[in-house]
Image (tube, grey):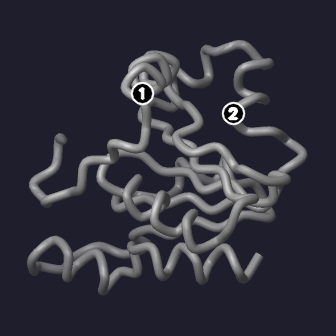
Amino acid sequence: ALTRQAVPMLNEIDVKIRREGVARGGYIAKRESGKLDLILLSCGSELQHAMKAAGELGEGTRVVSMPCFERFERQSAEYREEVLPSSCRRRVAIEAGVPHIWYQYVGLDGKVVGLHRFGMSAPGDEVMKEFGIDAAHVVEAAKSL
């Protein structure tokens, strides 16, 4: 992991899917088991919060890992639609940095859980909790859509 925070290994995501997905800039990290109702988007150290929130939000929740927007945009329209179907407008993105880039993917109906201000010094997990970057806040944002 390229973070100084201790993050859990997400072994439930198949290694082959991760490799191929990273090469394409974005991929389905967790596919919904029922009718698609909600998409959670994140990458890196925030992916853990999306995965945990998906477990709480139910079988209609998909998690998309998007490690490289530029690579994802170079994929075919069919692939982008497969990963982020336009029919699903309920979307929440999680970002520990500047959140603005995610708005192009969550659309007008979605939300971004992220840092909307700057400056706090404390251990990483305390800062993330203070700024609302955790599974509980992702669940709250998703339920408000």
Image depth: mark 1 or mark 2 in front: 1
Q: Residue at x 45, y 30 (%)?
A: 68
Most extreme residue toward the right is 87
Tell me if 25 is positioned left or right of 122 in this view: right
As helix, strand or loop, the secondary structure at mark 2 comes to helix
Q: Is residue 92 positioned above or below 74 on the image?
A: below
Amino acid type for the residue under numbered disc 1: Arg
- Give residue 8's position: percent from left, percent from top: 24, 55
Q: Residue at x 43, y 24 (%)?
A: 22
76 or 116: nearer the viewer? 76
Mark 1 = which residue? 18
Tell me if 26 is positioned left or right of 124 in this view: right
Q: Is residue 126 positioned above or below 62 on the image?
A: below
- Give residue 99's position: percent from left, percent from top: 48, 59
Mark 2 = which residue? 83
| Viewport quadrant of the C terminus | bottom right
62 or 11: nearer the viewer? 11
Q: Residue at x 65, y 51 (%)?
A: 62
Crowd around label 2: few <14 · some 14–19 · many ≥20 (10 Å): some
Mark 1 in CB contact with mark 2 (< 8 angstroms): no
- Give residue 115's position: percent from left, percent from top: 39, 70
Task: Write down the quadrant of residue 89 in the picture.
Answer: bottom right
Task: Write down the quadrant of residue 128 in the picture.
Answer: bottom left
Crowd around label 1: few <14 · some 14–19 · many ≥20 (10 Å): some
Amino acid type for the residue under numbered disc 2: Val
As helix, strand or loop, the secondary structure at mark 1 comes to helix
Task: Write down the quadrant of residue 133 in the picture.
Answer: bottom left
